[in-house]
Image (tube, rainbow, N blue to C red):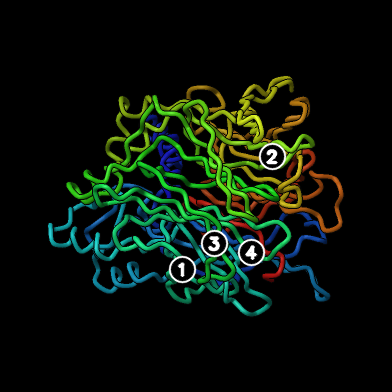
Amino acid sequence: MALWTCFLIICLLQALALGDVGFDMFFKTNLAEMSDSPLVYDRPLPSWLRGSLIRNGVGRFEIGNRHVTTTLDAYAKLSKWTFNNNSVGPTTTFSTKFVQSDSYTQSVAAGDIKPYMMLAPVEPPFEPWQTLQSMRLGADNMNVNVFNYGGKGNNSEGFVITSDYWNVYGIDPHTLGTRKPIKPKTPNAPFYDKMIVLGCSHSLPEHGTKNYITFLTLASAVPGLKSRYYIYRATSDEDREQIAEIEADKASYMHSFALTKNYMILVTTTLFFDLEKVYTTFNPSDALQYDPNAPVVFHTVNLKTGFVESYQTENFFFLHHMNSFENELGELVIDLVTYQNGYAMNIMNLKKLVNATTRSWFQPPLIKRFTLNIPKKTIDVSTFDNLTPNLPYTSKFDFPTINENFRFEKYCYVYGVVYAVNGSDFLDMALVKKDVCTGKTDKAWYKKGSYFNEAFFVPRPGGVEEDDGVVLVDILDTVTKTSAMVVFDAKTMTIISTAQLPTNNPFGTHGRFFPEIV
């Protein structure tokens, strides 16, 4: 599973030692599965809201007597909320199912976790031969994101779930059934079999086409052989076209990238892979080494020509991009959720995470703007104003979501989840709307004891204003100990309607809204 999730886990585990009610519900196995279970919303929904929010996440932490030691390795579970206003009347349903990956089905059949590649050891630990087998079989648990690489109507071909590994799984978006494992092509990657292979959880749509842009990381395991990044155009769930190739002395961990109408920007962090440690301990998380003194490098890739240029800037760590665009001067504007460093990425074991000493590293993120001038080869770094009274935390969020109609464009609004609102309790969360244009109209929704999954913005069809739409987010209420889908007015950040779920929804990662899936 993607390494970014550990940030949220660390925040949440802060509260475990403080005895927060309901905390364990977020990271507790829930075996319940259901299809199209009716939901009842307490107030009318917008008549135009039609489609399905499909989210990836986790749902099972143990099989038999063996359990994972990090939430990053818990088994993938999909959830779907469907909104269907038709001639008969509005119908709203909830579905949730486990991904029937090879690793999951084999483990369930055996009554024990089978040895596939994981980020951290399991308990009880595998035998040495099983650990070697896990490295040979590779990663198989795709529990991070959901995309449509070309499916239409009732044809589910093209719908996939992803992680930070290269392989993906095809799914049926209507039933949440698992179709097949998919190993996307890797054109012009001659050293594929000699590398540690990683992918990208956050592909982005290429402007003006039906394709997606993504990247492949080949971390060299052979002395003298450089690591490489391959920039690809995904034309289907399996097919890839090479756009560019970038060599690197050391491979960086990257969870996402930036994209404008004409450029892909690969921001290589200084969280590097130390492959000697992988082959010593056989745990991928042991390979991550953060260099606080090395510069972060922005690689710009011309999508038409494949030409690459590189620029250095200050040291920081990040996981998520907000949006990117080309301004009126032709500069590339890249908005990121930044962290001071990536040291905590090495701390994956839950026992370490509940220790006060190993938890104490956490500092809230800060959103920043990087403006790249290609002719001058410069990068200007700036922060965003917080000028809204009584909301000092609205630039300190993660899990950003925007109106996708404004991707690649100058925009003003981004939504996200803030942790540690009160400055001390990391489970004190708020849902925020950040005004990145003026900082004067920030908004937030806060209710103590509410744990948020990632929000998603759904624009009103035909809407012109950027914030004309709704924000969908499932919330765990630690007072009632129930999960609910909450629909917010994206302009005012007030609740339009709420529906209690028939089962508690565990920790979710990423997803998206598909208007065509009803």
Q: In front of the other: label 2 or label 3?
A: 2
Q: Which residue is mark 3?
A: 79
- Up the image or down, 357 lies above or below 414; here it is above
Q: Which residue is mark 1?
A: 184
Amino acid type for the residue under numbered disc 3: Ser
- Say whether disc 2 or disc 3 marks the residue closer to the N-terminus: 3
Q: Are marks 4 and 3 in contact (CB under 8 Å)?
A: no
Q: Is residue 196 left or right of residue 388?
A: left
Distance between mark 3 and mark 1 Cα atoms = 24 Å
Q: Kindly identify the residue that appears in the image at 65 percent across and 45 percent down.
A: 401
Q: Are marks 1 and 4 in contact (CB under 8 Å)?
A: no
Distance between mark 2 and mark 3 Cα atoms = 24 Å
- Up the image or down, 369 lies above or below 169; here it is above
- Say whether disc 4 or disc 3 marks the residue closer to the N-terminus: 3
Q: In front of the other: label 3 or label 1?
A: 1
Q: Which residue is mark 4?
A: 211
Mark 2 is surrounded, within 10 Å at the Cα level, by few (under 14), some (14 to 19) or many (20 or more) other residues, namely many
Distance between mark 4 and mark 2 Cα atoms = 24 Å
Q: Which residue is mark 2?
A: 414
How many labels were placed on the picture?
Answer: 4
- Secondary structure, mark 2, is strand
Q: Is residue 485 left or right of residue 188?
A: right
Distance between mark 1 and mark 4 Cα atoms = 14 Å
Q: In front of the other: label 2 or label 1?
A: 1
Q: In front of the other: label 4 or label 3?
A: 4
Amino acid type for the residue under numbered disc 4: Asn
Q: Position of residue 62 (x, y in %)?
A: 30, 58
Amino acid type for the residue under numbered disc 2: Val
